[in-house]
Amino acid sequence: MPNGRSLFRRTLSPSLRKYRAWPLTLLLIVAMVPCLAAPATAAETGNNGASTGTVTLSVIGDAKRGTLLPATQMSLQDGDTAYSALERTLSGKVMSSGSGETLYVSSIDGLSELDLGPKSGWMYEVNGAYPPGSASIYRLKPGDAVVWRYTLDLGADVGAPDPGAGGNAPGGASGGTDASGNGSAGDGGNAGNGGGHGAGEGASAAYDADIAALRKLLLAKPAAELSEWEAFALGRSGGGVPDAYLTELAAQVKAAGGAYRKATDLERIVLAVRAAGADPRAFAGYDLVAAVYNHDKLTLQGANGPIFALLALDSGGYVVPASAIWTRAKLVDWLLALQNADGSFPLAAGEAGNADITAMALAALAPYANAAEDADAGAGAAGTGGASSAAAASAAIDRAVAYVSAVQLPNGGFKLERDENSETAAQVVIGLTAAGRDPAGAAFVKTGGSLLDALIAYRTADGRFAHTPGGAADPIATEQAMLALIAYDRFATGAPGLYRIAAERFADERQIAGWASEAVHQAYAAKLLSGTSAFPLRFEPKRAITRAEFAALLVRLAGDRLNAVPSPGAAAEVAFADVQPSAWYYAAVMRAARADIVNGVSATSFKPGDPITREQMAVMIGRAFGLSESQSGTAWRDASSIRAAALPYVNAVADKGILLGAAGAFEPSGTVTREMAAVTAVRLKHLDLVS
């Protein structure tokens, strides 16, 4: 990430920030921003004023290219910067994007960022030190010696103190993906929830004002100046994106011929277009989705390309043909193979991981782990290897979450390399919420505060967010914090995740009964029930829900309540021969069994794949939520078919309106469809039985 701040910011790329290690996440994000390349300002190019002395400029490439410009003395003009001196001397040979503090130099004399690996790119040095900002805002003084160097290892090979600290991080475009400004390498991008409020709708409501204020700030900007991540944030915060933004973006896509060397540029545009309500499969005359799954340099930026390919493809549930260069299965397998033994994900194989990349990988893999529930029915996320792949993704997410919790700071925040920063905290919020994990949960509350506390601590007096503790408001930090707050709000209210922009309509929608439709969609949005395939999204409303599926549903509904449920009748060690640790439902069934909520059909068998009966469901609900064992309930016509031990629970769920009979009969041996289970789950939630 030379040229900028951190992996995520690297997509913005101001400068390798030698002394300001921007989060990997940021660099990645920056790289994901399209190269809007605003015209250079006077401060960037120099004002062609009177000479005020001289400076020395040199440009050193890789070992093969060698010195591109020997030390050359040049006149210093009033207002000259490290960038303007370079651009004026090598006019026509310098490629850059962005402006001001987000300007990023991507290529000099044909040698470009990422040409020699995911950590390669340009950095600049002044008088032997790497400045902590973009070359376009570093004002030169008479006698300064400026050296532009090409790094292969995020600056480590050219004497930079540590990655993402200063210079000109290889990274990329302006507007919110590469925030390195030629200071830190790494392209990736994930754009995109604080203070001790805890989880739930009340907690998310505490941030509504923050989100609204940030929306107002973005809408005050000219639409053409919005970054892709800013447009994405506007679209995902419940409001529209200015039409002028899409008009400007379409012009840029046409100018590029719909082709992008960096996959993250393309992936970021797909996400922004989708969030703005347009179709990236037919945008400006190009199928940008096909361009993603057929990109021949998808791994050029290390993990960032595959991560954001999955996020882009899944944002609209787009179909990927089996003939694609990158199918979903190939992308998922590539990411799973990248994970380190400690649970972290690195930028490239064999390297140490970090919280930024790990959080982004969490977001990308989440839909494939969620498909694990469907293994019981023989289904899995289409094209991902089915149940076994889903189980692998689920296990990878568990390890990644444990890693992120382990590296969290005592104050609830995170560091990238040596610097604590807001963007890494924002990325972790986004990744956790995508994976269905609560950022306000116990695992992410440390002695000095929670993750959300740490993020909100970066908020400045004007409502924006700083990059470092106590720092000034920063546009990229603000953009990322807004995405994190939106992600948390959507998580807490049960809305589809930050990156799940697809209209939540099932391929088998017409099979859902009218009386169950609203409940099915509520249960799905709240992640109480999953679809039975992801691409296309199916629900199978008429299929009988299994014992394992319903046990998992109850555990999700009951949550921490189960920890307080006494289990005097539960065996010290529950063991079912047909519930193996590798099964997606293992943890849920074991937890429910130890809480004495479910029993096996025998001492050693649970029959997880058998349809649950209405009587079994009544007993499980009654035990899970401590319903009064009513003895004076309805006089059922089929009471003789209801086991005596189950009758109090049957009466209790009927009294509460949770599970009703028909024509005076309860039908205890009848099965329960998935759509009926959804209705039951929503009734339980609305009765405030769930803590």
Image (cartoon, rainbow, N blue to C red):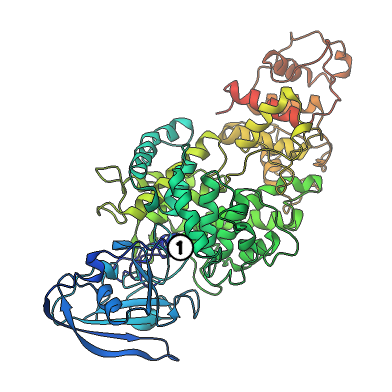
Can you say whether 530 is above or below 95 in the image? above
**In the picture provided, is 531 more to the left or to the right than 643?**
left
Q: Quadrant of residue 632?
A: top right
Residue 330 position, x and y percent, is 68, 64
**505 versus 413 height, above or below:** above
Residue 537, position in %: x, y?
71, 44
Res 335 → quadrant: bottom right
- To which residue does mark 1 refer? 28
Quarter of the image with the C terminus in it: top right
- Determine crowd level at label 1: few under 14, some 14-19, many 20+ residues with C-alpha closer than 10 A: many
Residue at 61% x, 36% y: name it: 525
Q: Is residue 142 visible?
A: yes
Residue 295, placed above or below residue 506: below
Front residue of 620/94: it is 94
| Amino acid at dot 1 | Leu
> As rendered, which of 67 and 406 lies closer to the eye?
67
- x, y (%) of residue 177? 43, 60
Label 1: which secondary element = helix
- Residue 409 makes an appearance in the image: no
**Left or right: where 560 falls relative to 482:** right
Query: What is the count of numbered marks?
Result: 1
157 or 373, which lies in front? 157
Please identify the quarter of the rendering in which residue 26 is found: bottom left
Q: Quadrant of the N terminus?
A: bottom left
The percent position of residue 6, horizontal first and vertical second, equals 39, 64
Residue in the image at 75% along x and 27% along y: 676
Horizontal arrangement in the rendering, residue 132 relative to residue 666 (left or right):
left
Q: 609 and 460: which one is in front?
A: 460
What residue is rendered at 59% in x and 48% in y?
Answer: 279
